[in-house]
């Protein structure tokens, strides 16, 4: 195995968005080392649409038998990058970075996958005004889910997710007319490597793919630099399974860790409400400042943009839920001074078609992510029914990106994985001036992930 390292780190870089699409194209071309500026696709050659695909067989009502896929890029693309969201994330949160990657990489479409559980979220309140959304969700008018009615989620684990993703991958390949690269953010990166090693009725997952893109996540202690331990014994896994069987079918970690409460959907609702107001009335006085949980209330009166900035930058609850955007001004409005303008965050997080946050993640999927973290066909994996039979056989290029979240463990994990496989090359790109969420929302002209991932994707053979 040979290794090429792309570990250029930019510290403290702050800049505003470029003034025109042509300037952005020129900057991207220069950063990629091109000698010519690529022409931007004409509107009639560019697609951005959400489509519905049949999901793989699994328990649950008929409306959950589908996955939704956001497609972005030129209509005549010869390659598709399929992106898997992280824990608590959904396809809408990948829209902006998908657009940036498709613009920066000739011949590329990017598809973002909504897992089937997103069908359980009642997003209808976001289809009107921000005031209506606030009344709908804070008045508990929305359709909430309960473990009693959704017990079938106890069976929605990694096998369900990867079987669904494979349907998306095969659709993207279009009977071999296009090559497919699989990518994922955060725990979505774990799913990427698991897919490559998975046995689909005798076919290894990596054979569907031309490359792998892991973004601020992975396996084998990839997140240990962030203080997250995925070690799991057989006894711990059995106890976790027992809890799920007893009715704990929802994973509420995102809400709990961010301080929004113990409802599995709480964090998603609050982040989307704050983003909706910041998008539709950024400089008006915050409407929900006094309603958000106390841990998220600023000490002064703020605007709608100011509240979103406070929640995700100046007073972010955890490093994994923060952006480098700017600061509150004396008047409570938000002042951009970082690579991720708060208006761009609002655009990425607001809306419902598709939404940026997943409401009802299955606890079984979280368990299976932990069980697969050793990236081995071991006792824990087999007890979960994980088909990680091809971990040593993977023979396609790997790219990994790491932000300031893990202090280098994403890259070391990627290299360790590659050392135990037939992966021909591994590219590791690092930008410690970026956060875990800057990767998704930063201005494309100042997004190191977009630049380095586009370079990797452009080098892959057709």
Image (cartoon, rainbow, N blue to C red):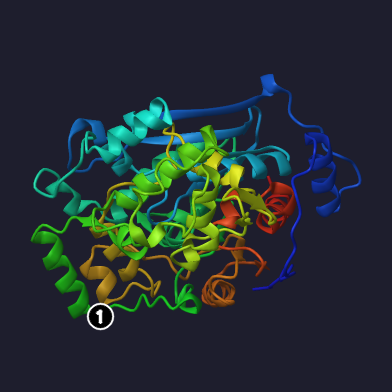
Q: Picture quarter containing residue 327?
A: bottom right
**Which residue lies most toward the top here?**
44
Q: Position of residue 424 (x, y in %)?
A: 64, 67
Q: Is residue 54 left or right of residue 304?
A: left
**Which residue lies most toward the right here?**
35
Q: Position of residue 337 (x, y in %)?
A: 70, 55
Q: So how many labels did they put on this image?
A: 1
The correct choice, above or below, for 286 with respect to 456 in the image is above
Residue shown at 58% from the left, 39% from the top = 283
Q: Position of residue 72 (x, y in %)?
A: 58, 34
Asked whether 290 or 460 is in front, the reply is 290
Q: How many other residues sit within 10 Å of disc 1, few (<14), some (14-19) or many (≥20)?
A: few
Asked whether 140 or 443 is in front, the reply is 140
Q: Picture quarter containing residue 213?
A: bottom right
Q: Is residue 311 left or right of residue 294?
A: right
For mark 1, give the secondary structure: loop
Kindly tell me whether residue 169 is visible in this rendering.
Answer: no
Q: Position of residue 19 (x, y in %)?
A: 80, 38
Residue shown at 27% from the left, 65% from the top = 367
Kindly tell me whether residue 40 is visible in this rendering.
Answer: yes
The correct choice, above or below, for 406 with respect to 298 in the image is below
Label 1 sits on residue: 233
> In what quadrant of the picture does the N terminus appear?
bottom right
Asked whether 127 or 195 is in front, the reply is 127
> In what quadrant of the picture does the C terminus appear?
top right
């Amino acid at each position: 195995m040979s290794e090429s390292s792309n570990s250029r780190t930019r510290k403290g870089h702050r800049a505003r968005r470029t003034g025109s699409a042509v300037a952005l194209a020129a900057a991207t071309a220069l950063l990629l080392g091109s000698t010519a500026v690529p022409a931007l696709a004409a509107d009639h050659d560019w697609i951005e649409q959400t489509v519905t695909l049949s999901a793989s067989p699994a328990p649950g009502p008929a409306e959950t038998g589908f996955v939704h896929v956001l497609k972005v890029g030129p209509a005549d693309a010869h390659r598709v990058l399929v992106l898997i969201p992280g824990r608590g994330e959904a396809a809408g949160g990948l829209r902006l970075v998908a657009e940036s990657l498709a613009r920066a990489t000739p011949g590329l479409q990017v598809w973002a996958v909504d897992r089937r559980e997103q069908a359980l979220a009642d997003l209808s309140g976001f289809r009107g005004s921000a005031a209506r959304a606030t009344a709908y969700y804070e008045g508990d008018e929305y359709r909430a889910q309960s473990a009693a009615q959704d017990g079938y989620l106890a069976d929605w684990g990694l096998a369900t997710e990867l079987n669904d993703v494979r349907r998306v991958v095969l659709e993207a390949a279009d009977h071999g007319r296009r090559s497919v690269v699989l990518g994922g953010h955060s725990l979505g990166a774990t799913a990427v490597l698991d897919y490559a090693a998975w046995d689909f009725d005798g076919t290894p997952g990596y054979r569907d793919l031309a490359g792998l893109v892991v973004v601020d996540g992975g396996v084998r202690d990839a997140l240990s630099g962030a203080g997250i331990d995925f070690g799991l014994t057989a006894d711990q896994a059995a106890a976790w399974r027992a809890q799920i069987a007893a009715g704990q079918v929802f994973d509420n970690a995102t809400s709990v860790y961010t301080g929004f409460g113990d409802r599995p959907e709480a964090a998603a609702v609050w982040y989307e409400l704050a983003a909706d107001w910041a998008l539709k009335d950024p400089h008006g006085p915050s409407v929900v400042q006094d309603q958000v949980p106390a841990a998220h209330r600023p000490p002064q009166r703020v605007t709608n943009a100011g509240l979103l900035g406070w929640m995700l930058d100046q007073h972010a609850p955890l490093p994994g839920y923060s952006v480098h955007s700017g600061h509150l001004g004396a008047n409570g409005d938000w002042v951009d001074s970082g690579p991720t303008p708060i208006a761009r965050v609002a655009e990425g997080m607001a809306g419902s078609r598709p939404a940026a946050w997943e409401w009802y993640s299955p606890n079984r999927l979280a368990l299976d992510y932990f069980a697969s973290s050793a990236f081995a066909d071991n006792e824990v994996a087999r007890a979960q029914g994980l088909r990680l039979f091809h971990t040593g056989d993977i023979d396609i290029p790997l790219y990994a990106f790491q932000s300031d979240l893990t202090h280098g463990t994403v890259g070391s994990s990627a290299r360790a994985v590659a050392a135990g496989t037939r992966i021909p090359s591994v590219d590791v790109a690092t930008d410690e001036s970026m956060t875990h969420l800057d990767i998704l929302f930063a201005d494309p002209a100042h997004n190191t992930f977009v630049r380095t991932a586009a370079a990797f994707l452009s080098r892959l053979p057709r």
